[in-house]
Each structure stands twice: as structure tokens, then as C-alpha cells.
Amino acid sequence: MTIQTAKLSDPAVRAFVNAVNAHDREAFLALLAPGATMADDGTDRDLAEWIDREIFFTHGRIEVDNESRGGRALLARHRNDTWGEMRTRWSFTIGEDGRISRFETGQA
């Protein structure tokens, strides 16, 4: 059962999912703390290159099935034009300023 994005617990994660699903790269980048980092399947990646390849240039979309850790960990279906749909996990580190300093994703 999909959780409506508006019902996600953490405001930064909710805004992250909204920006991905709206294909709004500018709003997405505004959510990230300076120097934010990310990893995919346990390997650190170049954030700007990864988000373009996996989200913005390939019409990425996230549908959340479950959340934990106060909304900072998600189990979701991520789909894009390159890979189709896959079950993924997402984990977020949020700074004191409410911005995302790191996110990790990978197949679930």
C-alpha cells in the first residue's frame, strides 16, 4: 500500500519525494545542505551526475510503501526510463538546518 507523499512524517524527506516526482531539479537541490553526499548500493557516487542519470533525465519517480526512523528511512518503488521499476530503500541524514546532508539508496 502506497503512502501518500503528503503523509510522510519528515518534512525534508516529504519535500525530497515531492521534488523527485515533480521532476523539479531546482527544488531538489535547494533541499540539500552544502557538500551533501549520497551513496547507491553502498558506493558513494557523484551526487549531481547520479541525480541527473537516475532521476531528472530519466523521469524518475518514487512511490513510498513504508517509512521508519521518524520518516528518515523509506521502502519505496523507484522507477525511471532506464531501469523500469525496482524496490528500493532510502535513508536520509538531516542537518540541524532541516536540509539533507546525505542520502543513501539501493535495491531492497
Image (spheres, helix red, strand yellow):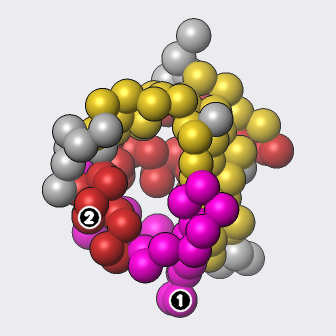
> What residue do we see at 43% from left, 79% from top?
46
On-image quarter of the C terminus: top right
2 and 1 marks in contact (CB < 8 Å): no
43 inside magenta stretch: yes
Q: Taking 82 as reference, is 13 above or below it?
A: below
> What residue do we see at 31% from left, 74% from top?
49
Estimate the x, y position of residue 70 in percent, counting from the top left. Answer: 79, 44
Estimate the x, y position of residue 19 in percent, counting from the top left. Answer: 35, 52
SS assignment at label 2: helix
> What residue do we see at 17% from left, 56% from top?
57
Query: In the rendering, which numbered label is found on residue 84?
Result: none
How would you rate the neighbour count of disc 1 (Cα within 10 Å): few for under 14, some for 14-19, many for 20 or more? few
Give the magenta-colored segment's residue range: 23-47
Estimate the x, y position of residue 84 in percent, counting from the top left. Answer: 30, 31
| Residue bearing the label numbered 1 | 35
Nearest the eye: 107 or 28: 107
Total numbered labels: 2
> What residue do we see at 70% from left, 66% from top?
93
Q: Taking 2 as reference, is 102 above or below it?
A: below
Is residue 11 visible to us here? no
| Residue bearing the label numbered 2 | 52
Nearest the eye: 9 or 38: 38
